[in-house]
Image (tube, rainbow, N blue to C red):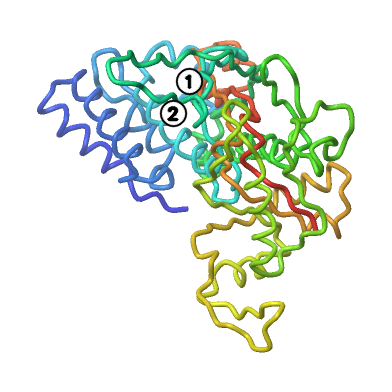
Amino acid sequence: MRATINYRELQSMYRAARKQHGKLGGSRQMVRFLSESISGKKMAPSDFSIKDLAEALIFDHNGEPVGREWVHDLNPLRADGVSLAEAANAVDISAFSNITQQIVSAQVMEGYEQAAFVISGLVRTIPTRLDGEKIPGMGKLGASDIEKIQPGMPYPTAGVGEDWQQTPSTTKSGVIVPVTKEAVFFDQTNQVLDRARGVGEALGLDKEKRLCDLVIGQTRNYNWRGVAYGTYSTDGTSTAHVTGDTVLAGVINKLASNELVDWTDVDAAEQLFAAILDPSTGEPVIISAKQVVVMPAYTHAARRVFNATEIRYTATSAATQTIMSNPLSGYTWYESVHAYRRLIAASVSASDAKKYWFVGDFAKAFAYMENWPITVVQADSNSEANFNRDIVAQFKASERGVAAVMNPRYVVMCTG
């Protein structure tokens, strides 16, 4: 890959910044400009060369560029045998490390935020500083709680009901991305970028799989008022996949033998929502968002069902068809290959798994409780890593959170 920002261009940027801000201020200004350009996507990680960055952005403690000498010192055939630790202590490599961190971070994020991670984009992200928390709630008021007020009488006060939910403990995931002496000396920029993107993809996939397990009902961690409940039930008394979970009484949100063929199958799922009541008010649960997740084998079926402009409908007592506008035009559907693979991992046969589909408001039903988002930090200079593994710089990508069921009343699982 040919870098578009080469050594001469970087040096030209530095001389211009140094002329305006002085030696030390010039290096800081240059780092700020490149960092903002990368984070603002005006420059791409592939626009840079690791070797050119090192040659242009390593200075002595007086602000003079000494990057070319530093890179030359990486050669183990040098007669004086200068070590990486000695070379690093003699110069300031912070500008090089900071820009490299920005490049690694951008590549990690590119891998982490892939479009294929469908469920991660549908659920809600809730920041939290706790390792699992008790979320207090206020009981909603129903129509029966509203009293008629006689003239001159005081208004009643809304009370706070005992309503709370316990979320599970969070977990931490992370990987270190090293930049080796060889990566700089041989200008192995491609390898560094591929490794960083692979780290982001692996962390994103790990999160997506945990969320998929939540959506398909394999992970069941809904804890309401101190009682653990299953996610799905076919009759309000039994749970999906396993037995032993307490069931939310009267909540039927799994519909068997409801293959996605036409609008009537969606209508059947909608009827389940109409029968689910809010436990605080006794009123029907209102579903405002209309989202559908299908397996890859039913992508074209979903396109036909949801994207059609009109449908032909024959009533039971009618002899002719009626042409009408598609009542499902307000739905948005998504294909999830990862949900399909997690169903198979949960011992659902491939022939059955491909017919599963889910409909509802995923942001209300599920959430990712996040202590911190995907973050890339630079490790402190470590002479032991330099000496033992020829590590010039290393960056740690990590995130911490947990997939949590927030309210299973807002999603329906359908099987074929």
Which circle marks residue 378 in the picture? Answer: 1
Residue that appears at 26% across and 43% down: 9
Residue that appears at 62% across and 19% down: 165
Q: Are marks 1 and 2 in contact (CB under 8 Å)?
A: yes
Which circle marks residue 101 in the picture? Answer: 2
Tell whether 371 sits left or right of 319.
left
Percent from the top left, x then y, of residue 12?
21, 39
Tell whether 295 sits left or right of 48.
right
User: Distance between the Cα atoms at labels 1 and 2?
Assistant: 7 Å
For badge 2, the amino acid type reads: Gln
Give 258 or 205, whichever is nearer the viewer.
258
Q: Is residue 185 above or below residue 347?
A: above
Res. 119 image quadrant: top right
- For disc 2, the neighbor class at 10 Å (few under 14, some 14 to 19, many from 20) is many
Q: Secondary structure at mark 2?
A: helix
Q: Secondary structure at mark 1?
A: strand
Percent from the top left, x then y, of residue 107?
49, 40
- For disc 1, the neighbor class at 10 Å (few under 14, some 14 to 19, many from 20) is some
Sequence-earlier tag: 1 or 2:
2
Q: Is residue 229 at least partly visible in the picture? A: yes
Percent from the top left, x then y, of residue 344?
83, 48
